Image: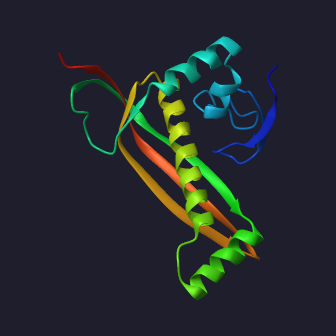
């Protein structure tokens, strides 16, 4: 069962209900939006993408030793945002005052990295890649009004590779 949701058009900012192929107001093309690709997948296609994603190779290098790049597909990204709760902020603050490492923060960063890299693998599988090269992770913190959020972006180049014999 597919669930409809609303997004604002990247071109004109008006609300649209997904899945939609174009904006109801300005006719901007929505066919390439990740939300549309995911909404249009059948259960069997979804299972196939998950299966292919587990086999995607990730590397920070520009090539893979023992493999040859046969096709460069596109730059892909995965974004993850995490709310940092009040208690975590309190314990991190105590670690800052008294010194030492914050195991809670380290665990949260590790979980965020793993989640974001798994999302990057999924994005690669969706575009038909079996590897992602030049993977880069960027962390940012946004805070204000007593709340803070951790923002993590993983990006890289989706490619098709084959083993060199």
- Of 106 and 50, the residue lying toward us: 106
The residue located at (25%, 19%) in the rendering is 163
User: What percent of the width, then of the height, locates residue 60?
Assistant: 33, 45
Q: Is residue 93 above or below residue 66?
A: below
The quarter of the picture where the C terminus appears is top left
Q: Give me the residue at 52% from left, 50% from top.
A: 113
List the single residue furthest toward the bottom.
Answer: 97
Q: Nearer the viewer, residue 126 or 85?
A: 85
* Horizontal side of residue 122 vs 61, given as left or right: right
Q: Position of residue 62 (x, y in %)?
A: 26, 41
Image quarter in which the N terminus is found: top right
Asked if residue 146 can be seen in this view, the reply is: yes
Is residue 21 in view? no
List x then y, in percent, for residue 159. 35, 28
Q: Of 50 and 151, which appears nearest the observer?
A: 50
Could you tell me which residue is drawn at 58 percent across and 16 percent down?
48
Residue 120 in picture, x, y percent from top left: 50, 38
């Amino acid at each position: 069962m597919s669930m409809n949701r609303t997004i604002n058009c990247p071109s004109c900012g008006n609300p649209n209900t997904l899945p939609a192929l174009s904006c109801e107001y300005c006719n901007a093309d929505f066919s390439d939006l990740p939300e549309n690709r995911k909404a249009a997948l059948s259960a069997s296609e979804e299972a196939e993408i998950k299966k292919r994603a587990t086999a995607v190779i990730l590397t920070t290098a520009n090539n893979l030793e023992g493999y040859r790049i046969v096709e460069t597909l596109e730059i892909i990204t995965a974004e993850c945002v995490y709310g940092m709760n009040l208690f975590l902020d309190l314990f991190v603050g105590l670690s800052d005052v008294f010194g030492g490492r914050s195991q809670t923060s380290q665990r949260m960063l590790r979980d965020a990295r793993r989640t974001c890299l798994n999302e990057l693998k999924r994005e690669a599988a969706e575009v038909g890649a079996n590897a992602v090269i030049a993977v880069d992770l960027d962390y940012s913190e946004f805070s204000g009004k007593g709340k803070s959020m951790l923002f993590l972006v993983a990006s890289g180049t989706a490619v098709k590779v084959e083993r060199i014999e």
